[in-house]
Amino acid sequence: MSSTGERSTGTVYEEVQASPEFAQLRSRLRRFVFPMSAAFLAWYLLYVVLASYAPGFMAISVFGNINVGLLIGLLQFVSTFTITTVYVRFANKHIDPAAKELRERIEGAE
Amino acid sequence: MSELASGSSVAQAPAAPTAVGSVGLNIGIFLVFVAITLFFVYRASRTNKTASDYYAAGRAFTGPQNGVAIAGDYLSAASFLGIAGAIALNGYDGFLYSIGFLVAWLVALLLVAELLRNTGKYTMGDVLAFRMRQRPVRAAAATSTLVVSFFYLLAQMAGAGGLIALLLQIPTTNQLGQGVVIAVVGILMIFYVLVGGMKGTTYVQIIKAVLLIVGAAVMTAWVLGMFGFNLSDLLGRAVENSPRGEAVLAPGLQYTNPVDFVSLGLALVLGTAGLPHILMRFYTVPTAKEARRSVVWAIWLIGLFYLFTLVLGYGAAALLPEGTITSTTQNNAAPLLAYYLGGEALLGIISAVAFATILAVVAGLTITASASFAHDVYANVIKHGQASPDAEVRVARTTAVVIGVVAIAGGIIANGQNIAFLVALAFAVAASANLPTILYSLFWKRFNTTGALFSIYGGLAICIVLIVFSPAVSGKPVNPATGRSASMIQGVDFHWFPLDNPGLVSIPASFLLGIIGTYVGRRRGAEDEARYAEMEVRSLTGAGAEKAIAH
């Protein structure tokens, strides 16, 4: 791996990987991003399937010329913006400090 | 979709898009853009010394800067002119497209951007090669990068003709005149990439994104203002003014085959996080946290922009004289709306920005493809990682010239061809050949070289075979109004795959091939364990990640 910058023997990484702090960081991140990814993909696919197979439902008027399809479409924007904001808060609060601590431990050991 | 379009808009003489605006003003505004960007490219060139400068802008951009640049890279002519035009003509179905393009960013935000920034150096191949056998994996990553970039690039260039007709009033029938313009733009693009490297290219993206988003925001406010900021009234007027009436508010006008739309939707939402020119942008920031901020900025800007295009598309349908927007003029909906609202000046600004869009996106693709060739193929596959950084950058620059020339030639040949499906195809290839391998290498311990090769080459091959034998290439019924089929090749029918977009088959197949290959390949040894430990720890903590260069 001559091309990927400095590369240690790997022992310090294996040590950190085996530590409970790292296991906690990893599971915290995965417990957030995996279910969230499944949720937004399911919500998006539901939208696509509704638009493809139920155009009549999407055409139902809610008020004025605003119909169900437009509202669900706009809700996709809202959910995307919301998930983005929630993730950033989560990562700033729960991921970054733990990552920083481990990084300093590794870089101190090198 | 075009058979639908001309089926219902019978015998309306479309307003010739070449008849409006002032050529001098259009060129003037475009030249101002070129002058400003050249200044930044020149300034960037003074600090362009190392390989990290050339490929990754010294990793010195901030998250917000990079986020704007990502928006500049992503909001291609296809998404601005294409989506606004599709909404103007087909209503709701154009909107569907933009939602897939936006939601896709969550994949990049949650699963890819930060971990990629922490483990790679310049290219997607870096991430895959971290714990796999270098040469085969890099060769595979470079192959799919070059294929995706080539399809994407060709699709951008093919759209240039309509814009040249609008901006310079050189009709699409004047192949020579159009070819000369494409060549000049291509040469300018090569110049940007060679002189400015990634830093110069990033400035071009930033300037273009700001102009595009501000221009679209002004037009959106203008259109909404004409309807007292009441979206319902705007939609009502669009219904009255459209030959399709009520149908423009509901899905089903553009995509008539529901399975096909699901397939396209899947490719759109999973493709973005596998697009090489988007992945490479994450290396231009100093840390994973900045990569996260980049994506957040990009999501807000891209999302707002697609909301603008919704208003602009329906605005064009509502305000332009009935029959202006047809299947042949739909890409001009936004510029024609600009002319309707603000006359020659606004038309000049919007068409110059649209033209700058092609220039900037092609520059981004060129630098990505050249980096992948120089860094993955030349330095690591051919030279076994022994190439000096200077030699590598030299190869990258040469490759950029070659790709630029290919882009010019491809653009001239593809000009006016019906190859809009290539963008969707590029997304399908990115989602099938790139995304499964990226996700497996970041998250799946057992994943190995054989799995990566199965997934990349398998996904790529399935995509290309399915598209060649799809109705997008041959066999769509001939439209009686124009005497042409909506397929790329006329007069023959060798299609057997029923869908235009291969995503529904190729994406699950490629994920599956990654698993099969992994179990076929050799078992993991102690060395693999150590490499996976290093990759996993680095990806999550940022330890040992490539640092920014201070100039």
Image (spheres, coloured by chain):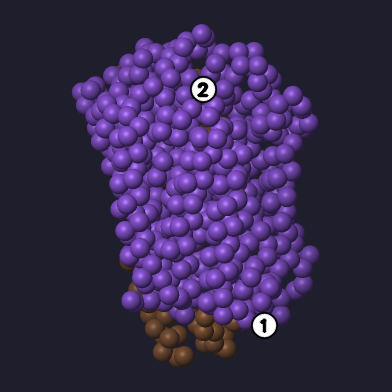
Question: How packed is label 2: few (under 14 Cα within 10 Å), some, or many (20 or more)?
Answer: some
Q: Amino acid at mark 2?
A: Ser
| As drawn, A18 above or below B98 | below
Question: How packed is label 1: few (under 14 Cα within 10 Å), some, or many (20 or more)?
Answer: few
The residue at which mark 1 appears reads as B527
| Residue lying furthest top | B11
Q: Residue at x 72, y 39 (%)?
A: B468
Question: Which disc number belongs to residue B311?
Answer: none
Residue B191 place in picture, x, y as percent: 45, 57
| As drawn, B51 above or below B405 | below
Q: What is the display colour for chain A? A: brown
Q: Nearer the viewer, residue B536 or B349?
A: B349
Residue B262 place in picture, x, y as percent: 59, 35
Chain the render paints purple: B
Q: Quadrant of residue B381?
A: bottom right
How much space separates mark 2 and mark 1, taking CA atoms?
58 Å
* Marker count (numbered): 2
The answer to which of marks 2 and 1 sits earlier in the sequence is: 2
| As drawn, B109 above or below B138 | above
Along the horizontal axis of the image, is B36 left or right of B8?
left
Tag 1 secondary structure: helix
Marks 2/1 same chain: yes
Q: Amino acid at mark 1?
A: Glu
Along the horizontal axis of the image, is B124 left or right of B63?
right
Residue B304 place in picture, x, y as percent: 33, 42
| Residue lying furthest bottom | A109
Labels 2 and 1 touching (C-beta < 8 A): no
The residue at which mark 2 appears reads as B327
Residue B464 place in picture, x, y as percent: 70, 45
**Which chain does the numbered disc 1 sit on?**
B
Q: Residue at x 35, y 24 (%)?
A: B20
